[in-house]
Amino acid sequence: MRARYGVPLGITAVGAAGLAYAAGFEVRSFRLRRVSVPVLPPGMRPLRVLQVSDIHMVGGQRKKQRWLQSLAGLRPDFVINTGDNLSDPEGVPETLDALGPLMEFPGAYVFGSNDYYGPKLRNPARYLLERASGRHGLNGNAPAVGVIHNPWEELRDGFDAAGWANLTNTRGNLKIDGYDIALTGLDDPHIKRDRYAEVAGGPEEAADFSMAVVHAPYLRVLDAFTADRYPLILAGHTHGGQLCIPFYGALVTNCDIDAERVKGLSSHRAGGQRSYLHVSAGCGTNRYTPVRFACPPEATLLTLTARDRD
């Protein structure tokens, strides 16, 4: 009897322990990653950029709110929010409260699909099937009947009132200690709201530094930004794979980027050009899959430094 049932029971116990860890500990084990990127013109002083992404705020997430508020103690030069702030249509006030101290700093933002639409309960296996088929997101189709529309306008108004630049298929500028930082952003490619033709043309020549911002790092967008000679692209969306295998990595990316670049700093090449790409693993989850494994929630402090002289 022991030999017959011992192994299945052991596997079940290990699985239950892993789920308890993923849902009870790691999903609330917030981390700050620090990354240095040599992208600034020679002679320019370093800039400290705090990237927050994929907050997926649900009412009552007090620890997450306190952690986000504490990030203001880093005193970044500016903040970039790469979208998916909501996972609850009632979450706007708590999101704005959590980000309130950070909105005292210059900043900019783009939205993701979960800012516009509430999450749906889905079979997690569909993500694997979508990756195999090459289909992701809503593929440009209207959301299905019954999808909740989030009050994204309230979120936008809160960010705008704080002076953050709205980069929805447009350009913006930040003034940092006399430097002109030019930003080019897109709406979410995951639901095909990106309109690159409206921002094409490359970095502003008069700016001291230019960078690109988007929620989901789809290859068509990365190719366009890189071919247009943006030295740095910031994105989120992937959750770093969310459920990863230790010593192996992510199984899915929820877009068409390769799993090796699902989070962290990498590079991208297109049109004979090369850009740095930073993908944040984000600090939240869809409310219906509140687990993380081997992929802690995070924000990133990027220190932009001067590149070597040509």
Image (cartoon, rainbow, N blue to C red):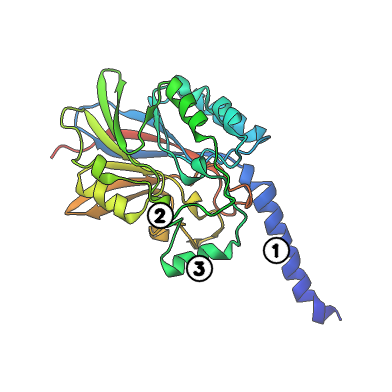
- Up/down of 244 relative to 284, above or below: below
Residue 140: give its label: 2
Residue 124 x %, y %: 59, 61
Helix, strand or loop at label 1? It is: helix
Mark before the other along the chain sequence, 1 or 3: 1
Mark 3 closeness class: few <14, some 14–19, many ≥20 residues within 10 Å:
few
Of badges 2 and 1, nearer the viewer stands 2
Of badges 2 and 3, nearer the viewer stands 2
Left or right, 291 with reference to 2: left
Residue at 54% from the left image edge and 64% from the top image edge? 126
Left or right, 123 with reference to 155: right
What residue occupies the far left of the structure in this picture?
310
Q: Quadrant of residue 63?
A: top right
Mark 1 closeness class: few <14, some 14–19, many ≥20 residues within 10 Å:
few
Residue 129: give its label: 3
Real-space CA distance between mark 1 and mark 3, rounded to the nearest whole angstrom: 23 Å
Residue 15: give its label: 1
